[in-house]
Amino acid sequence: MKALIRFSVLLVAIASIWTTGFLGSFGSNAAFAEDLPPTNFYTQDTSKIDLNNANINAFREVRGAYPTLGRIIIENAPYKSFDEVLNIAGLSDAQKEILKANADKFSLKKPDESLGRERINNANYRL
């Protein structure tokens, strides 16, 4: 009897989820991507690492920058110039050399806070 009740509850839950998902997509309150304002995060150029907006995982592209140097850069952002990045208090000479050697891989753009996202721990976990 318990199994029949559990099955019935599961069936009702699945039906309500499917109905909400199917019918909800046709409702007038649905937000479609074309209705949303464009953001720098959505249209960003990924050929370079934007030091004011990049996620910690972007620093994997630069040998020696992930995770420690990337975390330091993110925690001290925003920056107006690359010299500000090089003058972060506590950077070692080796870390400064990594930054200088890879300066062509970095860019600086206006900080984009529109998504309010977490740049260090954004729930991208390795399983």
Image (cartoon, rainbow, N blue to C red):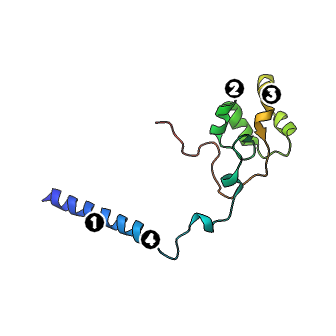
Residue 104 x/y as whole percent = 80, 34
How many marks overall?
Answer: 4
Q: Which labelled disc corresponds to residue 24?
A: 4
Disc 1: which residue:
12
Disc with the residue nearer the chain's start (4 vs 1) = 1
Q: Residues within 10 Å of mark 4 (few under 14, many from 20)?
A: few
In the rendered image, which quarter is residue 102 located in?
A: top right
Q: Residues within 10 Å of mark 1 (few under 14, many from 20)?
A: few
- Identify the residue shown where x is 77% and y is 38%: 106
Marks 3 & 4, CB-CB < 8 Å contact: no
Residue 57 x/y as whole percent = 62, 38
- Identify the residue shown where x is 62% and y is 68%: 35
Tell me the SS state at disc 2.
loop
Disc 3: which residue:
96
In the rendered image, which quarter is residue 119 located in?
A: top right
Q: Nearer the viewer, residue 52 or 31?
A: 31
Q: CA distance from mark 4 to mark 1?
A: 17 Å
The quadrant of the rendering that contains the N terminus is: bottom left
Disc 2: which residue:
64
Residue 120 x/y as whole percent = 63, 42
The amino acid pointed to by label 2 is: Gly
